[in-house]
Amino acid sequence: WGSFYHTLGINLFFFPFGMKTLPVNSGIVLKSLTKEYKGTKKAAIKDLNVTFSRGHITSLLGPNGAGKTTTISILTGLLQPSSGEVYVEGLNMQLHLSAARRQMGVCLQHDVLFQELTICEHLIFYGSIKAPHWEKSQLNAEVQALCSQTGYHPNLAGDLSGGTRRKLSIAIAFIGNSSMIILDEPTDGVDPCARRGIWDVLLKNRVGRTIVLTTHHLDEAEVLSDQIAIMDQGQLKCCGSPSNLKEMHGKGNSLTLTKKTRIKVERSQLTAKRCKGRNSCNGFVELNVYLQTNIYVWFLKQNKYNNIK
């Protein structure tokens, strides 16, 4: 992969033996990170080397089981790596876990909210914990700014929509002037309008921060990211800016076809039993013949639900 990194123009850090700190502008650096769970033969992540720069948004992109959530768990200190090192603002995280965590704001897949508190009450509560040294006026100013981005909802958290709850959880990650923001699938399960609102919160608060997020959405990674790191089976497959990755790997055109829904229930049920999990169903054999006849080079990206790409 060394020549590939060079081609993409990635700036990676290399470490002399025994080095425990890095320049503080490096943000977060993962060096030869590996995580193996007991009782499994395959590593969840293997020899992961990547830099998340300050002032940049980096998306970890990949299918389920790629190792994204394991990477996030190590970044937040919830898991210890089997080998390798994590540097946060120049500090070795294994040696300075408390200091590293004080700089972090985290939003995991599940919201940690109190049903009987409003949006502003949540921000005041978490802000007081994350920045106890702040003057009351400074805390109130940041709460007001984040409330305006999240939405002035007088409702209790238990009555908020799923999208608003996610925006609140992300605002909590930013409160207290956290310099490292870790987001695990922040837009998962929300409607398109709420996704756009979450994007706005991230883009408005990115300056001077290192933001790392995981996502399944290609469009989201492209819109938000300065850098995209694509993972699969616990390994980093490629890493670079959206434009670099598209230039290197995005050549060609994409064809999306929508399959018709079967009208007769009996026929649909019979087909499902006979063809479960096979590409030969729903006209794919006919499509395969057509593509081989009319298109010189092509490959299947997805055959899921009613869409073929």
Image: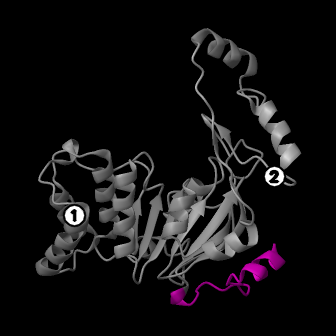
Most foreground residue, 80 or 72: 72
Q: In which quarter of the image is the N terminus?
A: bottom right
237 sits to left or right of 73: right
Question: Relative to 97, is 262 above or below?
Answer: above
Residue 298 marker? 2
152 sits to left or right of 85: left
Q: Is mark 1 on a helix, strand or loop?
A: helix
Question: Relative to 303, is 4 above or below?
Answer: below
Confirm or deny contact between disc 2 and disc 1 (CB under 8 A). Answer: no
Tell me residue 197's x, y (percent).
33, 61
Residue 123 marker? 1
Tell me residue 216's x, y (percent).
56, 53
160 sits to left or right of 247: left
Q: Does the magenta stretch include residue 14?
A: yes
Most foreground residue, 132 or 187: 187
Most foreground residue, 29 or 270: 270
Q: How many labels does the image show?
A: 2
Question: Amino acid type of disc 1?
Answer: Leu
Tell me residue 107's x, y (percent).
40, 59
Q: Residue at x 63, y 13 (%)?
A: 269
Which portion, as a residue range, is magenta? Answer: 1-25
Q: Which residue is drawn at 58% across and 87% down?
A: 22
